[in-house]
Structures are given as structure tokens and as C-alpha cells.
Amino acid sequence: MTERPAGQVFRDAETLQLGPSSVRWDGDDLIIRFDETTAPVPPMPMIPRRMRGTVRVRPRAINEIAFPLDDEGKHVWRPIAPRARVEVTLDDPSLSWTGEGYLDTNAGSEPMEDAFEVWDWSRAHLRRDSAVLYDLKRKDGTALSLALRFDTGAVPETVEPPPHALLPPTVWRMPRHTRADAGRPVHVETTWEDTPFYSRSTLSTHLLGEPCQAVHESLSLGRLRSPVVRAMLPFRMPRSLR
């Protein structure tokens, strides 16, 4: 998550290089290599650490369809791989694991905070299919709700969004919600990331007729625009000046 100047960035059709780290396609696999210095995070010792390793993302199938998030087409979201096998190998620290994952991308011709106020997103792996939910509110007051079911070939089907389900606010008191089948409870199992404007959690939920575990994120662009929050960003996102 290090911010880098333009001279440290290179991109072609298959590769994005950011300083010593890179993302590139190797056939159908996405290879993420990183060699970074982490930001100090309590309660660990307040000393930056080296983080080096490789993540290989093996999509089960590729979705070719992108979804516009605004009427002018300035912002587009594409769930590239609704389901993927992920292999993580870290050199420093020495760790490795594998598991099920997901890959998507957001692209835009303007900063996100210029267009949106909040969004809540989640994805869940069902027995065969995958479910992805996307709720956002734009700065002009309009809203968009997407509920998608992806089959094993990553072909999307738009379905009726399930009812809203409120989630408890974060430690930073940021409101958040999701959607779940009517009458079914939703519980936050673990919150991985909790910041003044962003949270990522694991949910125990029920979607499209199935009990499941979901990964959920909430993002407040209104909070991100705050000068106080912007002053805090360098402490979690180091900036390379050369």
C-alpha cells in the first residue's frame, strides 16, 4: 500500500510495476510479488517491518462483464474472478497458506471520493455458485444496488437484492450494513481492518437460500474527504518520495 511517484510506476498489457512490487498475468494466473516496508500497527512493537512474498491467484473462471457505477460511465467495477484459488508464500516473515479467494477491480477517471459517499460490498462462496452484493450511495443522493449470482463458469446473473441487514458500527463508529435473506440473522465473526473510513470483516450470513460465510467491506468516502483523516493516512500508507 506504499504510495509512489510516477517514476516508480510502469505498466504494459500484462504487468503493473510499483517500485519493487509488481502484479502481472502469467497465463490465466495473476502473480502478485511484493517487497515492502510495513506501517507499524499496535499492539505489535511500533517498528516498521519488512514484508516480502508472492501471491498466486488462480481463477476458477474469468468474468468478462464490467458494471458501470454511475450514469456517466466514469466509474466501472468488474468482478474478474468471483472464485479463485489463492496461494500465498511469504519470505519475510516465513509464512504460507492456501485458500479460496476472489478478484475484482475498480477503475475510474476521477477520484472515488468525488463521486460517492458510501458503499458496502460483500461476496460469498455458496455450494456451487458465488454471490456478490454491491450497495453504494452517490454524492448526488442517488443509489445503486447490485446483487449477482455467478455460476461455475463466472457467468453473472442479476437477482433481486435481498433485504437490508444492519451490522454493528465499527470501533471508529462508522455505520455499515449488508443484505441477507429475509428473516435470517447476520453476525460479524471477525473484523480484519478497522479504520476511520474503511472496514473489512467476515460475516456469518444467509444468501440466495444458503447459509454461508461472506467477506464484507464498508467504505465511507465522506470520511475519507476529511482533512483529519487525510492527515492520518501516511501513518498507515507509507509514501516513497524517490
Image (spheres, rainbow, N blue to C red):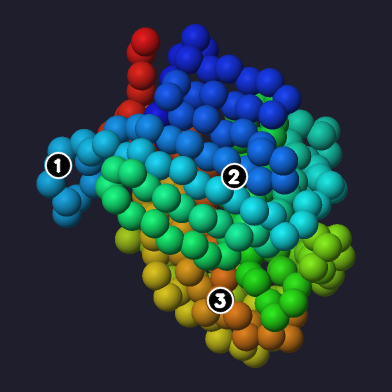
Secondary element under disc 1, as helix, strand or loop, is loop
Residue 4 image point, x, y percent: 44, 20
Q: Quadrant of residue 109?
A: top right
Distance of label 1 from label 3 (alpha carbons): 33 Å
Q: Nearer the viewer, residue 34 or 212?
A: 34
| Numbered disc 3: secondary structure | strand
Q: Residue at x 49, y 9 (%)?
A: 7
**Residue 117 tag number:** 2
The answer to whether residue 4 is above or below residue 199 is above
Point out the frontmost of discs 2 and 3. Answer: 3
Numbered badge on residue 130 = none
Which quadrant would residue 212 be assigned to in this image? Answer: bottom right
Q: Earlier in the sequence, mark 1 or mark 3?
A: 1
How many other residues sit within 10 Å of disc 3, few (<14), some (14-19) or many (≥20)?
Answer: many
Q: Is residue 142 visible?
A: no
Q: Is residue 94 above or below residue 111?
A: below
Residue at 72 percent of width and 60 percent of height: 60
Three-letter amino acid code at disc 2?
Answer: Glu
Which one is nearer the viewer's eye here, 92 or 226?
A: 92
User: Which amino acid, mark 3?
Assistant: Gln
Q: Please give the count of numbered marks on the rendered protein.
A: 3
User: Residue visible at 57% across and 65% down?
Assistant: 100
Residue that mark 1 sits on: 46
Marks 2 and 3, how far apart at CA: 27 Å
* Mark nearer the N terminus (2 vs 1): 1
User: What residue is disc 3 on?
Assistant: 213
Q: Nearer the viewer, residue 180 or 82?
A: 82
Where is residue 36? Give x, y as percent: 35, 32
Residue 16 location, quadrant: top right
